[in-house]
Amino acid sequence: MKNFNQKTLNKTINLSGVGLHNGINVNMNIKPAIENHGIKFKRIDLEKNNIIEANYKNVNEPVLCTKIKNSYGVTISTVEHLMAAFYGEGVDNALVEIDAAEIPIMDGSAAEFVEAIRAAGLQEQKEKRKFLKVLKKIELKDGERSISIEPLENDLIVDFEIIYKNPLIRTRRKEFKFSDGDLSSIYNARTFCLYEDIDKIKSMGLAQGGSLDNAIVVQANKILNEDGLRHRHEFIDHKILDCLGDLMLSGHRIFGHVVTSRGGHQLTNALLNKFLSDKANWEYQSYESQKEDNNYNTPIVANA
C-alpha cells in the first residue's frame, strides 16, 4: 500500500507573465516548502507584512477572480488557476514569491503551471496528507444560483452547470470525477467572456491585461480567437478548473460531491465558509491507496 504523504516541489519554478486584471507584468517564483506549511504567497515587492495564506477565510471581493487578503490588507488576485494546478498535481506545500498583486494569467488556463510543476518534479515528505471528509450535505442558494456538497467515499466529484443566453455557450453540464485521473481538458481550458461585456468589465478596473492570447472571447455565435476552442467542453471545463482552485483554499483536498448551477468564485467560497464553520460537517481523514498518484500525472494537452 502506498501512503499518501504530503508533497512539495523538487526545485524552484520561475514564471513570468501579465496580470489579467491589473495588466502589470509579473515575475513569480514557486519554491519548495516544509511539511504542514501549506500554500502561502509572499509579495516580494513589499518589505513587510507581505505573507498571505491561501485560505478560504482570506478571500476578499471574489468578482471575476479569487482575491485573498491578509490581516494587513495586502492582497493577491487570480490565485484560482495556480491553486487548481496544486490540487491536481498533488502539491501540498509551497511558497509563491511574486512581485505584484496578481498571479500571471499565462494562456488563461492552468496548463503552463502544470507543465512547470511536472518539469520541477515533486518530493514526498514524511507527514501524512489530511483529507477533508464531508459528513453531511450542505446547501446554499442565491437566487437562481445554487451549490451543495454531500458525502462521498474517497473521491471528489464536481457536477457543474452553466446557463448562458449566448447561443454558442448555452446551457452545459458536466460531472468531473477526480479519481478518473484525466485532468487534461480541465487544465487546458481557458477563461472566457462575452464580447458585449468587455467594456463593462474594463470600466470596473478589471481585465486590463486581457487579450485573445489569454482568454476566449465569444461574440454571438462566433469565437473571436483565431484557433477557436481547444475542445468542445472548454467552457464548462474552465468553470470546473476554477472550482477546483477555490476548493483548494480549504487547505486540503476534499472527499465529497459538489453540485452547482450558475456557480462561481463567490458561491464556492460561501459554501466553504458554511461547510467548515461547523465541525459536525466534516472530519479529517488520512488516506492510503494501492494506486500510485496517477491522478496527478495526466497529459496536459487535450484533444480537440
Image (spheres, grey):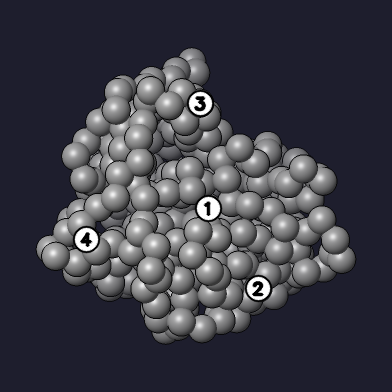
Q: Residues within 10 Å of mark 1 (few under 14, many from 20)?
A: many
Quarter where residue 167 is shown: top left
Horizontal relation, residue 287 to residue 81: left or right:
left
As measured in the structure, the alpha-carbon distance from the residue carrying label 1 to the one carrying label 3 is 22 Å
Between discs 1 and 4, the one toward the N terminus: 1
Kindly state the secondary structure of the residue where label 1 is placed.
Answer: helix
- Res 80 label: 1
The residue beneath circle 3 is: 277
Name the kind of residue labelled 1 in the image. Answer: Glu
Between discs 2 and 3, the one toward the N terminus: 2
For the point 70% across and 68% down, the residue is 98
Q: Residues within 10 Å of mark 2 (few under 14, many from 20)?
A: many
Between discs 2 and 1, the one toward the N terminus: 2
- Res 176 label: none
For the point 35% across and 41% down, the residue is 284
Answer above or below: position of 138 versus 171. above
The residue beneath circle 2 is: 28
As measured in the structure, the alpha-carbon distance from the residue carrying label 2 to the one carrying label 1 is 15 Å
The residue beneath circle 4 is: 181
Query: Looking at the image, is mark 1 or mark 3 nearer the viewer?
Result: 3
Kindly state the secondary structure of the residue where label 4 is placed.
Answer: loop
Name the kind of residue labelled 3 in the image. Answer: Ser
Mark 4 near mark 2, Cβ–Cβ under 8 Å? no
For the point 28% across and 72% down, the residue is 297
The foreground one among 37 and 172 is 37
